[in-house]
C-alpha cells in the first residue's frame, strides 16, 4: 500500500514540476525522490539532499548515513534505457566535483574522510522504475585537501 501511495505522489509531483520546469530537471528531481525512498527502504538515513558548496560549484544529490559510513550519492535518471545505463553519464569532471563538494561537507560537519563512501543510484523511469544501486567501495583519500 505504501509503495503504491509513494508512486502516486511521485507522479503528481512530477506532473506539477513538468509544468513549471524544463523536462530534464523535472525528471532528475523525480529520480531523486525515488532514490530517496529506495535508500530509506534499504536502511539508510537520509541526512541531506541537494547539498551545494558555498561557492555554488558542485552539488551532491543525496547524503546518507549507513552504519558508520557517510554516503554521498549521485542519482542519474533517464526516461528510458535506449541510450545505455544512466550512470554512464558520470564522467571524471562530475566525479571530481562530487569529491570536492563531499570534502567541503565533511569539513563543515566534522566528518572523518576515512568513513566516507561514494555511491550511485541509477534509475530508468519504466513502469515500475528500474533502480540500480551501485555501492562504490573506494574511499576518499584522507590526505587530500580541497
Image (cartoon, helix red, strand yellow):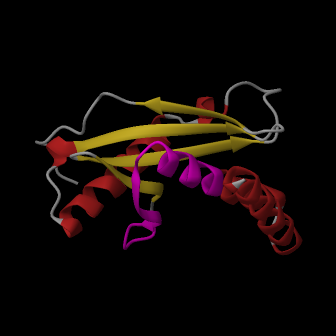
In the image, residue 88 lies at what x, y percent?
61, 29
Q: Residue 128: x, y in percent? A: 79, 38
92 displayed left or right of 34: left
Q: Which residue is painted at 22% across and 69% down in the image?
A: 108
| In magenta segment, residue 60 | no
Instruction: Give 8 or 89, whichever is nearer the viewer.
Output: 8
Residue drawn at the location 15% of the way across and 64% of the way down: 110
Residue displayed at 32% across by 54% down: 102
Location of residue 14 with respect to 43 vertically, above or below: below
Q: Left or right? Give the position of 18 relative to 71.
A: right
Q: Is residue 134 left or right of residue 104?
A: right
Question: In front: 68, or 135?
Answer: 68
Q: Residue furthest left?
A: 143
The answer to which of 94 and 18 lies nearer the viewer is 18
Task: Give the total number of marks visible in the rendering.
Answer: 0
Vertical order, 112 against 20 (above or below): above
Q: Quadrant of the C terminus?
A: bottom left
49 falls in the magenta region = yes
- Kindly identify the residue that appears in the image at 51 percent across and 47 percent down: 41
| In the depicted structure, whether residue 104 falls above or below residue 66 | below
Residue interval drawn in magenta: 32-56
The part of the image, by quadrant, that contains residue 63 is bottom left
In percent of width and height, residue 115 lies at: 19, 44
The image shows residue 69 at horizontal and vertical percentages of 25, 45
Amino acid at each position: 500500500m505504501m509503495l503504491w501511495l509513494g508512486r502516486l505522489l511521485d507522479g503528481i509531483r512530477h506532473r506539477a514540476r513538468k509544468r513549471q520546469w524544463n523536462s530534464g530537471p523535472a525528471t532528475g528531481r523525480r529520480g531523486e525522490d525515488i532514490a530517496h525512498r529506495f535508500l530509506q527502504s534499504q536502511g539508510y538515513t537520509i541526512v541531506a539532499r541537494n547539498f551545494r558548496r558555498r561557492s555554488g560549484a558542485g552539488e551532491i544529490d543525496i547524503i546518507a548515513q549507513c552504519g558508520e559510513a557517510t554516503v554521498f550519492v549521485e542519482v542519474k535518471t533517464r526516461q528510458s534505457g535506449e541510450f545505455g545505463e544512466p550512470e554512464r553519464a558520470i564522467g571524471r569532471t562530475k566525479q571530481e566535483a562530487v569529491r570536492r563538494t563531499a570534502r567541503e561537507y565533511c569539513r563543515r560537519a566534522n566528518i572523518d574522510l576515512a568513513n566516507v563512501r561514494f555511491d550511485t543510484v541509477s534509475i530508468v523511469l519504466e513502469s515500475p522504475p528500474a533502480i540500480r544501486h551501485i555501492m562504490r567501495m573506494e574511499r576518499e583519500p584522507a590526505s587530500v585537501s580541497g
